[in-house]
Amino acid sequence: MLALIGVLLLGILPGLLITVGLSVMLLLGRESRPLTSVLGRIPGTNAYANVEVVPEAEVRDDLLIFRLDAALMFINATWMRDSLRDLLAQRETPPRVVLLDLSFSPDLDIKALDVLAKLNDYVGERGSALWITGAHKAVRDMLIHGEEIGTIARIPRFLTIGDALAALDDPQAAAMEAVTQKEER
């Protein structure tokens, strides 16, 4: 509808250019503040869901599973960090592990890597560990080779939430994951 009005009032090229510009601005505005989810395990399954959508989903006191429901990138990285900080501030006791699900992120940019490194430091200062799950291969490669960006290469990475929970429940498994990460380099 906007394109039609723009074309009728301004002509074909100016109308379409204004429409494309407005569409890009709307897209960037939406991506700058995407939805976030705290995940819990659906009882009787190995599936995880947003606890606001599935209230019966089980949440552990020693774990916070956080997912950005969009790709993590420069336009929303700081907002994601602030959202996670707010969630941590609301808890009476810090969780042992903050598990960040990056399954919506096919790639990361420099800003996102920088925010992850600083978030890792922030979470560590509060007595928790930041772990990452669901990272695509390109993201895992960037995390492995991101040594130049603070502590990011030392963040434990897991393919699935289940793998991360197994490591949380069995410290020996966590040690094996660390060995695997060293072999990836």
Image (cartoon, rainbow, N blue to C red):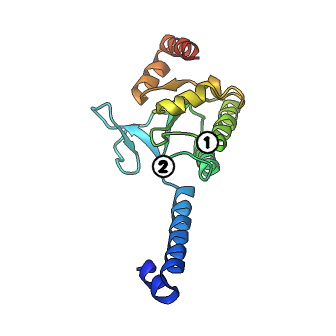
Question: Picture quarter containing residue 88?
Answer: top right
Q: Residue furthest left?
A: 44
Instruction: Decide: few, some or many residues near mark 1? Use Cα within 10 Å; few <14, some 14-19, many ≥20.
Output: few
Tell me the crowding category of disc 2: few under 14, some 14 to 19, or many 20 or more residues within 10 angstroms, Cα based.
Answer: some
The reply to whether residue 62 is visible in this rendering is no
Q: Judging from the image, what secondary structure is the residue with disc 1 in? A: loop
Can residue 128 be seen by looking at this rendering?
Answer: yes
Camera-nearest residue between 173 and 11 = 11
Whether 122 is drawn above or below 6: the answer is above
Q: Name the residue at 43% across, 20% down.
A: 166
Residue 85: quadrant of the picture = top right
Image coordinates of residue 128 in percent, x first then y, are: 62, 30
Q: Which mark is residue 70?
A: 2
Q: CA distance from mark 1 to mark 2?
A: 14 Å
Residue 159, horizontal then vertical, whole percent: 44, 26
Rendering coords of residue 100 (x, y %): 52, 36
Q: Give amino acid for label 1.
A: Asp
Q: Which residue is mark 1?
A: 109
Amino acid type at circle 2 is: Ala
Nearer to me, 182 or 175: 182
Q: Comparing marks 1 and 2, which lies closer to the viewer?
A: 1
Q: Position of residue 56 (x, y in %)?
A: 34, 43
Q: Nearer the N terminus, badge 1 or badge 2? A: 2
**Element type where label 2 sits in the image:** loop
